[in-house]
Image (cartoon, grey):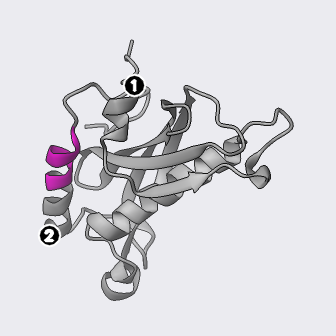
Amino acid sequence: MTTIPAYEQVASLPTVHEHVVGPKHLDENRHMNIAHYFTFGGSAIWARHQRDLAMADTYITERGLTTFTAEQHLRYLGESVEGDRLGVSVVVVDRADKVLHVAALITNHTRRELSCVMEAVTVHVDFGTRRPVPFPDDVAAVLDAAIAGDRPAWELPLSGGLGVRR
C-alpha cells in the first residue's frame, strides 16, 4: 500500500496552479465538488505540457501533434472547503514511445495536507489522423529529463492501476 507523503514533502514540489475554494466550487455536502478537482488537476497537467514539456500552444498548429487523455484516476485524501487555498503540482511519472503517465497532486495549504491525486495517462496523437504516434525525439528528450528531474525522494501516492503498459 502506498504511503501518503507529508505536507512538507508535497508542498516542496513546484506549483503549476493555485486556487481558492469559493462558493461556486461547493456541492451539497459543502465541500469542493469532484468536477473541480478534475478541472484543477486537468488544467495543471495541460499547463505543464505547454510550459515545460515542449508542447506549447503552437504544438498542434505548427507540428500537427497533441496529446489525448486516455485514462484518469482521482484519489481523495482530504476534504477541501470554502476558503481553503490549494496548490497543484504535476509530476511526470513515466513514458513510452506514444504514452505519458503524469500525476497532479492537489495540496490544501490551509489544512496542510494532500487533498487529492489525479493521475492521467495521455496518448501522443497526430492531430490530422487522430491516431497515436511516437513523441518526436526533441519532445521525448524533454520528457525523459522531466521524469528524471520530477521524481521525489519519497514515494508518490499513485493508484497502481494506471501506468505505461510495455
Q: Give the residue pinned by disc 1.
A: 160
Would you say residue 124 sits in the magenta stretch?
Answer: no
**Magenta stretch: dominant secondary structure:** helix
Cα–Cα span, label 1 and label 2: 29 Å
User: Type of residue at label 1?
Assistant: Gly
Residue 3 appears in the rendering: yes
At x 27% / y 65%, what residue is drawn? 52
Q: Which residues are magenta?
A: 145-151
- Examine the structure image and report whether residue 147 is included in the region drawn in magenta: yes
Quadrant in which the C terminus is drawn: top left
Where residue 138 is drawn, which disc sits there?
2
Local crowd size for mark 2, using a 10 Å CA cut-off: few (<14), some (14–19), many (≥20): few
Q: Residue furthest top?
A: 1
Q: Amino acid at mark 2?
A: Asp
Q: Which quadrant would residue 110 be assigned to in this image?
A: top right
Q: Earlier in the sequence, mark 1 or mark 2?
A: 2
Give whichever of 144, 128 is nearer the camera: 144
Percent x, y of residue 100 = 32, 50
Quadrant where the image shows the N terminus = top left
Local packing at callout 1 (Cα closer than 10 Å; few below 14, some 14-19, many 20+) is few
